[in-house]
Amino acid sequence: MISSPGFSEKEKKEVDQLVRSSSNGEAVFSDRFMGDNAGRYIFNSLKKADSNGPTSVDAKGCYMGLESGLAIAEYLKSPITKVEKLSLEWNSLGSFENGLTEIATALALNSSLQSLDLRNNNIGPNGGSMLARGLRDNRCLQSLDLRWNEIGNTGALAFKEIFTIGHNTLLRTLKLAGNKISDVVLNEVEAVVGRKIEPGASGGSMSDDYHVVKGKNEELQKEIANISAELQAAKDENRTKDSQHQIVHARSKNDLVSKIESLEKQLSDSAGTISLLEIEVLREKERADRLQDSVVKEQREKDTALSSLRVDREAAASKKIIADREKAQLTTSLKITEETLEVLRTENDNLRRNFATREKELLTSLSDRERKLSEARGQEDKAKAEQSRVEVELGDAKLKEKMAEERATQSARLLDECIEDRAKQVEEARRSVQETMETQRNELMGRLKAAELRVSEAESKLGSAESKQRAAESAAAQATVTLEQQLSEQAYKLRKEYGDMQDGETRQLADALDVVKSQRESQDVQLSQMTADLENLRDVRQRESESAKRTIEGLNKSLGDALKEARRERGSASDLKLEVASLRRQIEPFKRKVEVSEAEKKRTEEFRTRDVSNLQALLANEREERAKEAIGYQKRLDDCNEMLRTAKESISEQRTGHMKEFHKLEKGMVAAVQAIFADRKAGGGGGGKKRSKRKGDAEGGAAVGTEGGENVKNEGNVA
């Protein structure tokens, strides 16, 4: 079951706010990746909204599964639900049969829903059949989008059945692209529905080859039937003609028998090719399923990391507020430094977000290039299939064609492996950077807590010392100065460690960027190797085409020799002319096929050249953008280092000034204490005058010290 990472009380409040604000309007929860429990909470909240709920709900990309499917079904079954448009694209509702069964049942009972979007939900053939049964009694749905769900011919035929029987009469738009439905079944569904049906691709290049070979098989069977009919007609004519005609027809019979045997052999070879292609189609489907599972797993890990990072940020913010309240004087003296560090932290976050955005763009560009390469391979496979048909009908080029297909498959496999390796390396680098940052952040927070505890303990000790030993003012002042020096040293050490941590994070980001660059260069080398393989494949195709031409020329020459020999042997030319015309009609399709194959090969070569040039241009632009980004990152790092150096110098200057003021204050307090002790030792009237004088001097010194302390405090506030 799909989990619900990071669905906090704050997000629940946001969902409730969206539900309340969507009265008679649209509720949008798309691309939140909240999980299955979050989806259940969303639709339960919509159900509780009663008649004030929205008419349009967008829950695309929320990672919903079984629990969400059951909640959606209950929401649609509610008689007061008035939703008209429901978008559930990019979820996993079809992965759980129970949830999809309840949704199908709810569609049969719902009376308001007009448009339903279920793209990319892993519905499959059984799920498609269940939805079709649910639509039998539906009287409101007008548009259904089932693209990219692999419902296959089974699911498509289930929809054909409900329209054939006449249950559903309102459905106007049925989108079935990317469901691996054959053209024959799709045409049957379209003919029965009589409405707008968007055709879907057969599912990939291997499936296209399968249909092409299947078409060849049908053509060969028709040709065998025609030749068998001609053979039967020749047998009937042989019974009525003379011995000379019987000899001629016997020869024709032998030729036809040899042709039939050759065509049967080609038919068996085609059947073997069909079985191989079916195996390849199944393998490709398994590979696509594994890739989709890895993408879902990676997205879940990203969601978990984001939620933990959000919690850490909130905890850090709350701890920072508490520390600011408890250490007002320390916050005042370090205000400039904290602002500088905040700017650096913001800059670091921006760099991290830019790095993530750039990584997504790179992944998108890689997927686009993979799609272009797959299209080029599909076009190449079509040309290959056409060439294979000519080669199979003419003779001995089948082995070479299989070798070429194996090389193309190997190149595609190498490309897929390189892309998977690159994605794994990027994920490992990102994970290591995140773990290092988390460890350093935890260590820093632990040290800050320890410093706060030491400050609180020192303050408590200072208060008790002042209450018990008010007479020892000089000792208390000295202890206060020593404690403040220790606090300033600890703050300096913490700031230095935090700066070192920031530098380490920056270096790690730079190292990750270097790793991505090196991986990109290795992919460029692999792309060059694939281009060379395509060139070799084109040369092999050209040689095979020339061989086919030579074979046709040899057949034409043999035909001419046979005609000359027949003219010399037989005097009657009427039957011979008919046979020659028949043979020429049989050869003409072969010639046309060769011409079509040549034209297709030229178009494929043009497409390949254009795609290669476009890819090279994209790679060049990508390299330039990477170089510019690296320069910008280096400049930002230099600016950050300069700001840190300036902040350190400012802190050092402030510390020096504060120490001077503290020394002045200490001297004044020592002088005052000495004067008081001298007054106590003296006696008599003169002693009283001296004590008053010394007391006045001490008070003056204390006043000077106090004034100096106030000046220090004012200077700290100004700073």
Image (cartoon, rainbow, N blue to C red):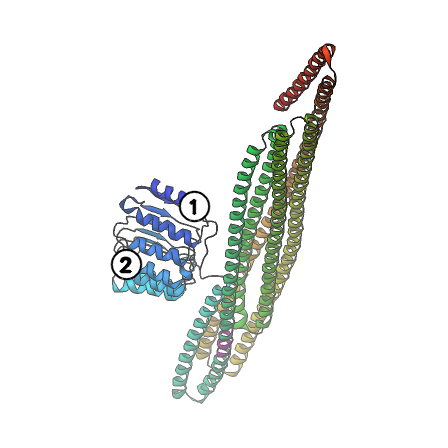
The residue carrying pointer 2 sits among few (fewer than 14), some (14 to 19) or many (20 or more) residues within 10 Å by Cα, namely many
Q: Position of residue 569 (x, y in %)?
A: 52, 83
Q: Position of residue 111 (x, y in %)?
A: 26, 53
Front in this rendered view, residue 533 or 395? 533
- Which is more N-terminal, label 2 or label 1? 1
The quadrant of the picture occupied by the C terminus is top right
Q: Amino acid at mark 2?
A: Ala
- Which residue is disc 1 drawn over? 9
- Work out which residue is located at the far front of the displayed protein and give it: 684
Q: Residue at x 41, y 77 (%)?
A: 225
Camera-nearest label, 1 or 2: 1
Element assignment for label 2: helix
- The tally of labels here is 2
Element assignment for label 1: helix
Q: Position of residue 261 (x, y in %)?
A: 49, 81
**86 in relation to 283, above or below:** above
Q: Main secondary structure of the magenta part?
A: helix
**196 in relation to 185, above or below:** above
Magenta range is: 263-270
Could you tell me if the residues under marks 1 and 2 are in contact, i.e. CB atoms within 8 Å? Answer: no
